[in-house]
Amino acid sequence: MAAKKRGGRKKTGARKYGKAASKRDESAIRRNKKGTLRSGKGRKGGKVTSRKQAIAIGLSEARKKGAKVPRKRAARKRS
């Protein structure tokens, strides 16, 4: 009898994002679908329309709460 081969990715290193970060992210995506997610501060914050923007807001909130989230990539300098 041959050993069963397990599919999927190899496990290399630790998790990039913590569980708390994914919870915040899911919450932001849910609020986006509901139509209550806003970008910016205050009442004037614009309505979020894209999924990518919702994910970015979720990760940003997670960072503020101190969850395990990699730092934002620095903007490229133009020469």
Image: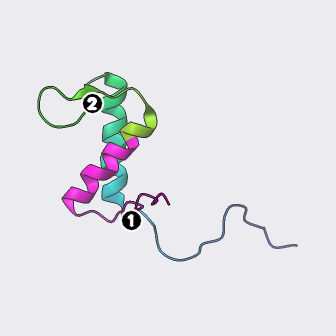
Query: Which residue shows up at 39% across the image and 26% down it?
Result: 49
Does dot 1 land on a helix, a strand or a loop?
A: loop
Residue 47 spot, x, y in % from top left:
29, 25
The residue labelled by disc 2 is 37
The quadrant of the image that shows the N terminus is bottom right
> Residue 75's quadrant in the figure?
bottom left
Q: Which residues are magenta?
A: 55-79
Q: Identity of the amino acid at label 1?
A: Pro
Residue 43 spot, x, y in % from top left:
12, 27
Q: Coloring scheme of the render?
A: rainbow
Label 1: few (<14), some (14–19) or many (≥20) C-alpha neighbours in 10 Å:
few
Q: Which mark is residue 49?
A: none
| Nearer to the camera, 69 or 1 | 69
Residue 57 spot, x, y in % from top left:
31, 43
| Nearer to the camera, 62 or 46 | 46
> Residue 36's quadrant in the figure?
top left
Label 2: few (<14), some (14–19) or many (≥20) C-alpha neighbours in 10 Å:
many
| Location of residue 67 with respect to 42 vertically, above or below | below
The residue labelled by disc 1 is 70
| Location of residue 37 with respect to 21 vertically, above or below | above
Lower position in the chain sequence, tag 2 or tag 1:
2
